[in-house]
């Protein structure tokens, strides 16, 4: 069939043509937005799940919902080793620019921008002149507010001021943070503290975060009350009906159909993971001669899709690991079997090594985002089917 008309989109964070299976989370977020708009208290929101389940896509969808209600929004992607001040300043600047035109008092808007500038300037205040960063905020910095140098104190003051600005307009502000597990410990603590203050104040500002399955543990390690501070949504595989819909609805727009056996084979191959659904759907479309798409088309296309995943989705991650880390992952795959969580003691036993000697490899893999600490003494792959890929490589 015509590859130009191929509707499937297996890209990083790229929205699929049919966002199936996420209605529950979208509806719940609509309730959050409506309650806050009516002055009701609500918690910030956290999305957690493995890579490839569509967290970033859903995060962008929720942001679109906030924008549709005239909220101010900004988004950042956390990165290991990056301080929060600079990216958050840019995101909040964007959010306030969306709200400011409707505000009745330009001087109050200007004052907030001055506070935001002071907060931003602290990001490089201790660096030399050549390394100092100047935020693109064309107002004088306001001294004595959000510029103490203590990230938690400054963040609380900044977000409360931003929320007050939004309250005056009758809307809210939402800050979206992707890859939130990569934030520094102090920054996580500051966000928890700020969200606690915002909640107590009934302020119309929320944080919407997305991260790997251990994000709740990261937040809990920072603040013991974090389990009550956020509304958590675990993003997982699509059920059969949703996975089929993700394939058939876009195809119907192009007057193409799937035979039932073909859908059975595709669900078995993709296992309901949204990225895999799109990846297999795209290759099957390109290989099929005509509609309806048959199980024979799936049989021909599957090895090609698997090769693409092996290079782009799995292989690129595997190449980032050191030889010691690769040995650790291969042992982990052999022990885990079904790609689930596995005790670190079992990996040490598999390698006939003392657990302490494997700590550098394990810690390196966690920092690279290849595995996560599922619970005390247990780890899991951040990428679905990664264990299966490693076992296939060994064969």
Image (cartoon, rainbow, N blue to C red):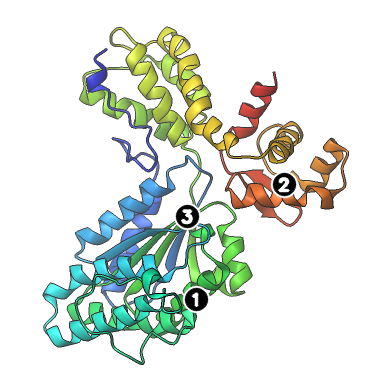
- State the image coordinates of residue 199 (x, y, percent, origin top left): 42, 79
> How many residues crowd around disc 1 within 10 Å: few (fewer than 14), some, or many (20 or more)?
many
- For the residue labelled by badge 1, is the local secondary structure a helix, a strand or a loop? helix
Picture disc at residue 190: 1
- For the residue labelled by badge 3, is the local secondary structure a helix, a strand or a loop? loop
Picture disc at residue 244: none
Q: Are marks 1 and 3 in contact (CB under 8 Å)?
A: no
In the rendered image, which residue does mark 3 sit on?
A: 179
- For the residue labelled by badge 2, is the local secondary structure a helix, a strand or a loop? helix
Q: Is residue 297 visible?
A: yes
- State the image coordinates of residue 45 (x, y, percent, origin top left): 43, 63
Of 244 and 229, nearer the camera is 229
Image quadrant assignment for residue 204: bottom left
- Report the residue at 39% width, 50% height from top: 24
Q: CA distance from mark 2 to mark 1?
A: 30 Å
Marks 3 and 2, the one that precedes in the sequence: 3
Tell me if residue 126 comes above or below residue 291 in the rendering. below
- State the image coordinates of residue 212 (x, y, percent, origin top left): 54, 51
Marks 2 and 1, the one that precedes in the sequence: 1
- Report the residue at 37% width, 53% height from top: 59
Tell me if residue 224 comes above or below residue 160 in the rendering. above
Q: Is residue 151 left or right of residue 144?
A: right
* Quadrant of the snapshot with the C terminus: top right
In the rendered image, which residue does mark 2 sit on?
A: 361
> How many residues crowd around disc 3 within 10 Å: few (fewer than 14), some, or many (20 or more)?
many
- Report the residue at 50% width, 15% height from top: 303
Q: Are marks 2 and 1 in contact (CB under 8 Å)?
A: no
Marks 1 and 3, the one that precedes in the sequence: 3
Q: CA distance from mark 1 to mark 3?
A: 16 Å
Q: Nearer the viewer, mark 2 or mark 1?
A: 2
Of 46 and 356, nearer the camera is 356
Q: Nearer the viewer, mark 3 or mark 2?
A: 2
């Amino acid at each position: 069939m015509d590859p130009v008309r191929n509707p499937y989109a297996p890209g990083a964070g790229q929205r699929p043509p049919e966002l199936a299976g996420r209605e529950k989370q979208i509806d719940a977020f609509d309730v959050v937005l409506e309650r806050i708009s009516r002055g009701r208290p609500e918690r910030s929101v956290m999305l957690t799940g493995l890579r490839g389940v569509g967290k970033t896509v859903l995060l962008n969808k929720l942001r679109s919902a906030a924008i549709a209600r005239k909220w101010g929004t900004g988004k950042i992607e956390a990165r290991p080793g990056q301080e929060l001040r600079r990216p958050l300043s840019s995101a909040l600047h964007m959010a306030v620019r969306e709200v400011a035109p409707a505000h009745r008092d330009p001087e109050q808007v200007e004052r907030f921008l001055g506070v935001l500038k002071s907060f931003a300037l602290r990001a490089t205040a201790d660096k030399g002149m050549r390394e100092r960063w100047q935020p693109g905020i064309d107002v004088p910095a306001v001294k004595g507010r959000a510029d103490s140098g203590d990230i938690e104190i400054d963040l609380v003051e900044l977000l409360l001021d931003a929320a007050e600005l939004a309250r005056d307009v009758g809307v809210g502000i939402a800050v979206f943070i992707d890859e939130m597990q990569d934030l520094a410990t102090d920054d996580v603590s500051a966000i928890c503290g700020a969200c606690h203050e915002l909640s107590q104040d009934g302020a119309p500002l929320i944080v919407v975060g997305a991260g790997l399955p251990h994000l709740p543990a990261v937040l809990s390690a920072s603040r013991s009350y974090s389990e009550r501070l956020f509304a958590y949504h675990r993003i997982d595989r699509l059920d059969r009906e949703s996975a089929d819909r993700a394939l058939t609805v876009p195809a119907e727009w192009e007057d193409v159909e799937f035979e039932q056996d073909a859908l059975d084979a595709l669900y078995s191959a993709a296992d309901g993971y949204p990225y895999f659904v799109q990846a297999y759907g795209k290759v099957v479309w390109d290989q099929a001669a005509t509609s309806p798409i048959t199980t024979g088309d799936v049989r021909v296309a599957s090895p090609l899709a698997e090769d693409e995943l092996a290079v782009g989705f799995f292989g690129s991650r595997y190449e980032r690991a050191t030889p010691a880390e690769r040995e650790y992952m291969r042992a982990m795959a052999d022990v885990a079997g079904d790609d689930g969580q596995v005790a670190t003691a079992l990996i040490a036993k598999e390698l006939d090594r003392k657990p302490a000697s494997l700590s550098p490899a394990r810690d390196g893999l966690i920092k690279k985002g290849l595995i996560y600490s599922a619970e005390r003494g247990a780890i899991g792959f951040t990428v679905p089917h990664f264990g299966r890929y490693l076992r296939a490589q060994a064969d």
